[in-house]
Amino acid sequence: MIVLGIDPGYALMGWGVVEAQGSRMRLVDYGCVETYAGTPMQHRLRSLYLGVRDLVNIYRPDDVAFEELFFAHNVTTALMVGAARGAAIIAATEYTEQLYEYTPMQIKQAVTGSGRADKKQVQQMVRLLLHLKETPQPDDAADAIACAITHCQAGVSKEQFRMK
């Protein structure tokens, strides 16, 4: 099974592709789709859409897993990231209906064993679980890889995380 994990973002949208065979996982590739401040919103969203569309066409994932949005304070940021997430969902839906979503707490729990883990702990576990020499950078890409790992570990219970 090949899983594309996506950490939605407006400036940086992290992505990671993980291949799972049973309980064995292998990192295929990772990175970020980047947009730039000062670029009109519609052009940034189009870039994100095209970036995700390219990813699904290149890697042909069986499933696409998204990290759900969580914002405590900044409404403007939440709206922009929500729009970016929507662009990514549309691009992925054009390729497959196998879309899933996980909360940040579910991802932390799956990867580290604690839903209260910090970013450094998640990144360290991503490195260890995938037998990597270095921690994937930037953080957005490592978060997307963690989302893909979470989905790989969900196994048959993945249906409860299907995007509705």
Image (cartoon, helix red, strand yellow):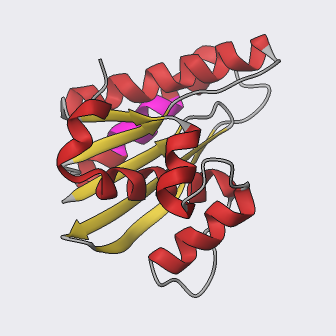
Q: Is residue 129 left or right of residue 10?
A: left
**Image position, residue 49 (x, y; %):** 44, 29
Q: Residue at x 25, y 42 (%)?
A: 158
Whether residue 40 is visible to the viewer of this picture, yes or no, is: no
Which residue occupies 73% across, 55% down?
Answer: 118
Against 3, residue 65 (above or below) is above
Of helix, strand and loop, which mostly describes the magenta segment? helix
Residue placed most toward the observer, 60 or 152? 152
Image x and y of residue 39, in percent? 71, 25
What's the magenta region? 47-54
Q: Is residue 38 visible?
A: yes
- The residue located at (51%, 35%) in the rendering is 103
* Along the viewing direction, whichever of 103 and 86 lies nearer the viewer: 103
Image location of residue 146, percent across then percent down: 50, 56
Compared across the picture, whether 29 is left or right of 34 comes to left
Residue 52 shown in magenta: yes
